[in-house]
């Protein structure tokens, strides 16, 4: 579904991403770890096509189409959606109206979707105006549910969220990625994955979101490079025990550790 080939990205005069190679298959959930300033958010913003992020080398392909220099709206129409860590407040635009725009021309019951994430009372409020951290995250999820993208980008879905909201957000993220599919009795993880169609690329610092997801693969981003590919829970346990400094040695070994 997504193929990133030797991607180099700069912000102003500073090179942030330094040769990223990554493939995410249909229905696959990929977890991205790393310290602050390592380039994780830059990767997501570049994939979404924001103008401050300049691709100096490499290529991004989505569903077989080169989108390296495509505008943001075209990527959204092709089926890429994003939940931001700190989305802006938009005065004068009602949340419900934005959700309907996200649905494009698809028949969507906005009231029903809002009820699923406890956002019914927010539909007539300006987008994110006076929202708490958990309410902002639920608003982002509501917009994604209406859009129904094939690839969902999450920038720290657990950031600024209390434990009560975390449970609802985690379960909603899983339904977004799994397409509301319930596992059949006796069905293996491989068989469950084969039924999934939505792919996810998720940044996490705490790892709380892993309690709710069928995460397939993970890597660490450090200093603009990807390294240390492994099972997401194994990476989290290693980072908790040794910290990200171990990634320096991993990178010196070609990313294999």
Image (spheres, rainbow, N blue to C red):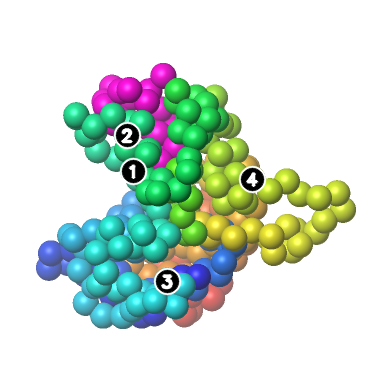
Of the two numbered discs 3 and 2 on the same chain, state the one appearing first in sequence: 3
Give the quarter of the image for residue 89: top left
Q: Which residue is mark 2?
A: 97
x, y (%) of residue 199? Answer: 53, 60
Disc 3, disc 4: CB below 8 Å?
Answer: no
Q: Which residue is mark 4?
A: 180
Of the two numbered discs 4 and 1 on the same chain, state the one appearing first in sequence: 1
For the residues labelled 3 and 2, the Cα–Cα distance comes to: 28 Å
Disc 3, disc 2: CB below 8 Å?
Answer: no
Q: Give the residue drawn at x 13%, y 64%.
A: 12
Q: Which residue is mark 1?
A: 101
- In screen coordinates, is 19 left or right of 206? left
- Is-magenta flag for residue 124? yes
Of the two numbered discs 1 and 3 on the same chain, state the one appearing first in sequence: 3
Pick the residue in front: 237 or 63: 63
From this view, report whether residue 27 is shown above or below residue 135: below
- Is-magenta flag for residue 233? no
Disc 2, disc 1: CB below 8 Å?
Answer: yes
- In screen coordinates, is 16 left or right of 149? left
The residue furthest right is 186
């Amino acid at each position: 579904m997504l193929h990133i080939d030797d991607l180099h990205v700069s912000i102003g005069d500073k090179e942030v991403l330094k040769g990223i190679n990554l493939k995410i298959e249909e229905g696959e959930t990929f977890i991205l770890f790393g310290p602050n300033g390592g380039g994780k958010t830059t990767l997501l913003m570049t994939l979404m096509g924001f103008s401050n992020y300049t691709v100096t080398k490499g290529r991004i392909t989505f569903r077989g189409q080169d989108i390296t220099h495509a505008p943001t709206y075209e990527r959204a129409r092709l089926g890429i959606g994003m939940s931001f860590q700190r989305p802006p407040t938009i005065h004068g635009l009602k949340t419900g109206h934005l959700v309907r725009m996200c649905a494009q021309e698809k028949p969507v019951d906005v009231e029903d979707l809002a009820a699923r994430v406890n956002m019914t009372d927010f539909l007539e409020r300006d987008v994110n105006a006076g929202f708490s951290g958990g309410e902002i995250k639920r608003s982002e999820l509501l917009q994604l549910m209406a859009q129904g993208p094939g690839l969902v980008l999450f920038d720290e879905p657990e950031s600024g969220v209390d434990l009560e909201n975390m449970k609802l957000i985690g379960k909603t993220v899983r339904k977004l990625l799994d397409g509301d599919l319930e596992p059949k009795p006796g069905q293996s993880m491989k068989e469950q994955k084969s039924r999934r169609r939505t792919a996810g690329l998720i940044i996490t610092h705490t790892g709380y979101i892993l309690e709710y997801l069928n995460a397939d693969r993970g890597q660490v981003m450090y200093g603009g490079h990807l390294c240390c590919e492994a099972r997401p829970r194994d990476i989290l346990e290693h980072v908790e025990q040794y910290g990200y400094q171990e990634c320096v040695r991993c990178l010196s070994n070609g990313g294999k550790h």
